[in-house]
Amino acid sequence: MTVELVKHSASDTDVLWAARVSTAGEQSLEEVGTDPERSAGLINYLMRDRHGSPFEHTSMTFFVSAPIFVFREFHRHRVWSYNEESGRYRELQPVFYIPGAGRRLVQEGKPGRYVFTEGTPEQHRLVEQTMAESYRHSYAAYQEMLEAGIAREVARAVLPVGLFSSMYATCNARALMHFLSLRTKSEDAAVPSFPQREIEMVAERMEVVWAELMPLTHAAFVANGRVAP
Ligand SMILES: Cc1cc2nc3c(=O)[nH]c(=O)nc-3n(C[C@H](O)[C@H](O)[C@H](O)COP(=O)(O)OP(=O)(O)OC[C@H]3O[C@@H](n4cnc5c(N)ncnc54)[C@H](O)[C@@H]3O)c2cc1C
């Protein structure tokens, strides 16, 4: 899977000037960077008391390449903006997801609180072989229909959700924190979530990039139980 930050306008100072307009009006821009300790304190206060709107004055655009089943979960997050490659306008390429050796395969426990345990070598082999065979079969059916003159938008119906797609996804820091709170599993979380591992892998990479852009905001997010303000 690929996660790349392609453009951004996102820093802790974006949060600070937006918040300080409350008390400093148009002077708020001049106060940015004058007192780092006060700045960290203000961001922490905003996070703790869930004053969320100052975190919205930021923008990050990611290029993501991941299986369609990850995108289906991703696109439930409505306050992001998306543009995805089209199965109507281009021929889809045969790039499919096969879980890596480290992917825990066996699901145990109750819905919403599943625990995943290691698969046996036989189970790993089964997953790899069955998926590869099924993908080959589906893609051959897709190709057969395209070669017979069937429209891409019709032929694509046989392709599985393990097929890779790509998109640009744009969000602000508040939306990203909401996404991270739901799509990562962390011991720091005040409200634990149990996301599918594959979308969590995407979320984890986004978090690393975001933490570099907005270290004070990221630290406050973690310190306040990974709850989006
Ligand atoms: C572990 C996990 C399991 C899930 N399982 C399922 C499942 O089995 N079936 C399923 O269908 N979905 C499932 N989902 C998806 C889930 O129901 C949400 O659609 C998804 O997490 C997006 O969250 P959201 O709506 O808060 O986010 P966003 O759409 O990004 O919205 C952000 C926030 O904006 C506000 N908001 C946005 N739109 C509205 C609106 N129309 N009305 C009021 N407030 C709004 C809300 O405060 C919301 O939290 C699951 C999600 C997770 C994390």
Image (tube, helix red, strand yellow):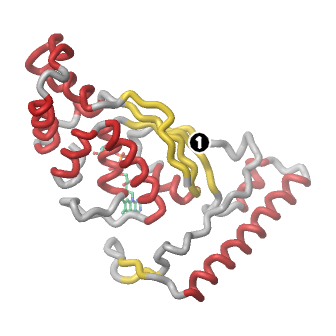
Query: Which secondary structure, mark 1?
Result: strand
Is the CB–ligand 1 distance for label 1 below 8 Å?
no
Look at label 1 and name its amino acid.
Glu
- Give the left or right position of residue 153, taking residue 102 as reference: right
| Spot occupied by residue 221 in the image (x, y as percentages of width and height) | 22, 47
- Give the left or right position of residue 101, taking residue 38 as reference: right
Looking at the image, which residue is at 64% across and 76% down?
Answer: 128
Residue 149 higher or lower than 213, as above or below = below
Looking at the image, which residue is at 17% across and 26% down?
Answer: 19
Residue 76 higher or lower than 105, as above or below = above
| Spot occupied by residue 118 in the image (x, y as percentages of width and height) | 45, 82
- Find residue 9 and report its image quarter: top left
Seen from the viewer's position, the closer of residues 119 and 193 is 119
Q: Assess disc 1: are there few (<14), some (14-19) or many (≥20) residues with their C-alpha within 10 Å of its C-alpha.
A: some
State which quarter of the image contains the N terminus: bottom right
Q: Residue furthest right?
A: 148
Residue 110 higher or lower than 57, as above or below = below
Q: How many marks?
A: 1
To which residue does mark 1 refer? 84
- Give the left or right position of residue 95, taking residue 4 as reference: right
Looking at the image, which residue is at 76% across and 68% down?
Answer: 136
| Spot occupied by residue 163 in the image (x, y as percentages of width and height) | 65, 59
- Find residue 79 and report its image quarter: top left
State which quarter of the image contains the C terminus: top left
| Spot occupied by residue 28 in the image (x, y as percentages of width and height) | 16, 16
- Give the left or right position of residue 5, taking residue 158 as reference: left
Looking at the image, which residue is at 56% across and 70% down?
Answer: 99
